[in-house]
Image (spheres, rainbow, N blue to C red):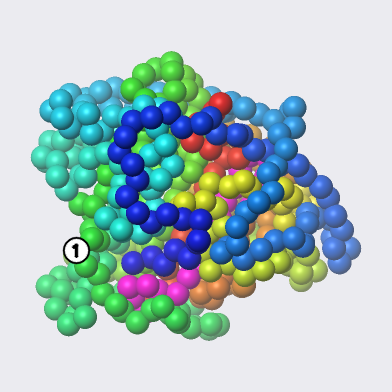
Amino acid sequence: MSALINPTAEPGFPSRTRGHRQALVRRAVALATCVGLGVAGCATTGSASSSAQLTTQKAIPASATRTGAGGANTAQVVAAANAFLATLSDEQKDTVLYDFDDAAKKTGWSNFPTPVVERNGLKLGDLTDEQEAAALKVMEAALSKKGYEELVEIRKADDYLASLSDTGDTGATPTAVPSATPTGTPTGGPGGGGGGGGANFGSEWYYISFFGTPNKTGEFTVQYGGHHAAYNITYAGSNVTMSPTLTAVEPMEFNWEDLYYAPLEDKRTSTISAIQSLTADELAAAEIDGSFDDLYLGPGNDGPFPEQPEGVLVSSLTKKQQAKVAAMVKAWVDDLDEKAAARMLAKYVSEFDETCIGWSGGTTLDNDQTYVRLDGPSAWIEFSNQPGASTDEIHQHTIFRDETADYGWK
């Protein structure tokens, strides 16, 4: 089980009453440029541990972008959603549909397995084969081919964890693949030790819900998730945001049912490549103050975003380094349907003169303390290595948010 250490999280059972939450206050970055070790960059002080309470609210500049980049395949997603809803009974429809502003949207996703934190909507394991296939078609429409394959692999990783037991009698002989990096800090560490899986892991423990009725012009959110994946994909006409989206995995690589899996490999390799492209002086300037045992703005903590980003300004880097940072952003954005993803990526790259990349704990894949963050006027990405919780291998949590479109637009 993933170990979320965050006092602002409320791992309980969210209210199932239908009500309207207060409109979210949209945040955008109030940016500043500082110089550290002769390198142009962002703030390098004022951070806190991931277990600290966030108290500073960002101001919203008049120039803040309040809508998406366009290109959403909304009609296809609506068609898939309606096809899924047509397979459901009236009682099931009542369970899967929420008001768009229902507060349960913000509490019904986590990196804890179900039912430690209850998810919204319908459990896939309770659906008929026809209904489950239709539910997955919704996600297949919303995501790119690459993004959907990653979702499938994350669910396979949960099946792998479910097969583990203290006795080792798994029946399917799953095996973790040793780290490909033979040097550096060993994998595992405190919290690891192969505690085994359990009944609450597995691909059947994923849920789907809709906040707002799926339609081609108004706002609605597709929420899908379970243990190590949580998607909040909001549509408003031609615009789409996938903020917040959590993707995670334990272990990084494994063999299951005679197949090899490495979920999040593109996110891992692009993140480490980007941060390791910095020079020694740039790395020193990019170090974020404080230590991070998990995501800073993960489940149960929707902000506010830090008032001032930390790290080095991406636009101060060489073109080759900037290309590596762009590849890092692309690894998350490309989970979305291709046309919208291309437009969204162009928007985020255009903001590199106000975007910072930073790190804490380590910069290598085999270090269970490695933490990397990208913070721009819009894009927010966190990559967090952690000791194994159910295995002896490192596992990872990642989060993607859009600071101007978290859970949609207001």
Q: How many other residues sit within 10 Å of disc 1, few (<14), some (14-19) or many (≥20)?
A: few
Can you give x and y, in whole percent of width and height, for residue 383 in the image? 54, 59
Instruction: Magenta stretch: give its range.
Output: 374-392
For residue 344, side relative to residue 177 (left or right):
right
Q: Quadrant of residue 376?
A: top right
Camera-side residue of 336 and 93: 93
Q: Is residue 276 visible?
A: no
The quarter of the picture where the C terminus appears is: top right
Can you give x and y, in whole percent of width and height, for residue 217 in the image? 43, 16
Q: Is residue 116 magenta?
A: no
The residue that disc 1 covers is 199
Q: Indicate the amino acid at tag 1.
A: Ala
Camera-side residue of 118 and 158: 118
Q: Quadrant of residue 29?
A: top right
Q: Is residue 369 visible?
A: yes
Q: Secondary structure at mark 1?
A: loop
